[in-house]
Amino acid sequence: MKVHQLRHLVALASAGGIRAAARALGVSQATVTQGLRELEADARVALLTRRGGGIGFTPAGLDLLAHAQQVLAQLRLADEALARHRDSGGQERLCIGITPWVAQTLMARVVPVFRAELPHVQLELFDGLSAQAYPKLREGGLDLVIGRIAADDAMRGLQAQPLFSYEMTVVARRGHPRAGAQSITELLDDDWILNFTPGERASLMDNLFGQHGVTPPQHHIHVAHSALMVQTLVQQTDMVAFCPWPLVETDSLRHSLVALQLRERFRTHVVGIIRRAQEAPSHAAARFIALFLAQVRAWAASDAPELRRVRHSVEFVQDGPTDRP
């Protein structure tokens, strides 16, 4: 097996097709096709399934994909290490995906301490959907994720340390005509602005509507690929949204948004620290994790009003934040 073949395999999984994988790699479709054929020949087992609907992975292909992602991630780490030797003045980079409500609650308390301890490390922080961060984490584009822990099938190749659970809630701007709604059925004629990946749509629709015996109002559902866009539209229009309850309690949103007191309850999610499985974190990543966990413990004991409001909307997972700085 050759590195370029593994790159083709990983790109196929991320892009979803030969054409998109070729575009992402900057090569021709024929090059990707040839590389994958050679990889299957070398493996002496079928790795891909080819049907009218596209290309999928066999169980052997999924196993090899997990290893390929780890191999490419290790090669990137090796290249970064060599780059530091080539240019002693160069910065080390730490890339972290963070779910928005955690970013708004704790990051301002973690980042200054981290920067004081490791001033040579450049932080690259991403907020957004955890489901979009998982592929980047597997492939090495992110070093760790502080976000929602998904079901086991979506966590392939990853490991997670759970920290706290939270509920989802329907939100609207303060003063919304249906701010006093008591049931999801009262909101079916309103426009919804939601933030989800295509693979999450069915689960989200079931959590929000289906489990309560309600048919999703498809012609009223709109998608924003940005949490900030969702917040802005809900604040400035009569659209409603579905978001983590802790987000509504943050200082930046509690004065403009309201969590509707509906009788329906929604499935909870768990936030944790997510890393690549069977891979030790870099020194910078380990220090960030330790400092973050220290702030989580401080948050649990804090009397600061802005932190206490958010804390009351989550449940701490027993024995979650155990690492020490």
Image: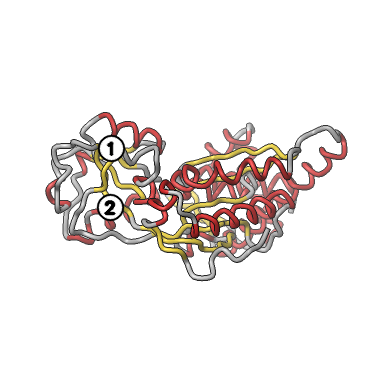
Residue located farthest toward the bottom when viewing the structure as drawn: 318
Number of marks present in the image shown: 2
Quarter holding the C terminus?
bottom right
What percent of the width, then of the height, locates residue 261? 20, 53
What percent of the width, then of the height, locates residue 318? 49, 70
Residue 59 lies in quadrant? bottom right
Q: Is residue 177 left or right of residue 211?
A: left
- Tell me which residue sits at (53%, 66%) in the image: 320
What percent of the width, then of the height, locates residue 89? 83, 32
Residue 205 numbered mark, or none: 2
Secondary structure at badge 1 equals strand
Cα–Cα span, label 1 and label 2: 12 Å
Residue 321 numbered mark, or none: none
Q: Is residue 246 left or right of residue 265?
A: right
Counting residues from the N terminus, which is met first, the one under dot 1 or under dot 2? 2
- Tell me which residue sits at (32%, 38%) in the image: 223
Residue 222 numbered mark, or none: 1
Quarter holding the N terminus?
bottom right
Residue 159 lies in quadrant? bottom right
What percent of the width, then of the height, locates residue 238? 21, 33
Secondary structure at badge 2 equals helix
> Which three-letter amino acid code belongs to the residue tagged 2?
Met
- Tell me which residue sits at (55%, 59%) in the image: 297
Q: Is residue 16 left or right of residue 3?
A: left
- How packed is label 1: few (under 14 Cα within 10 Å), some, or many (20 or more)? some
Q: Is residue 222 above or below residue 136?
A: above
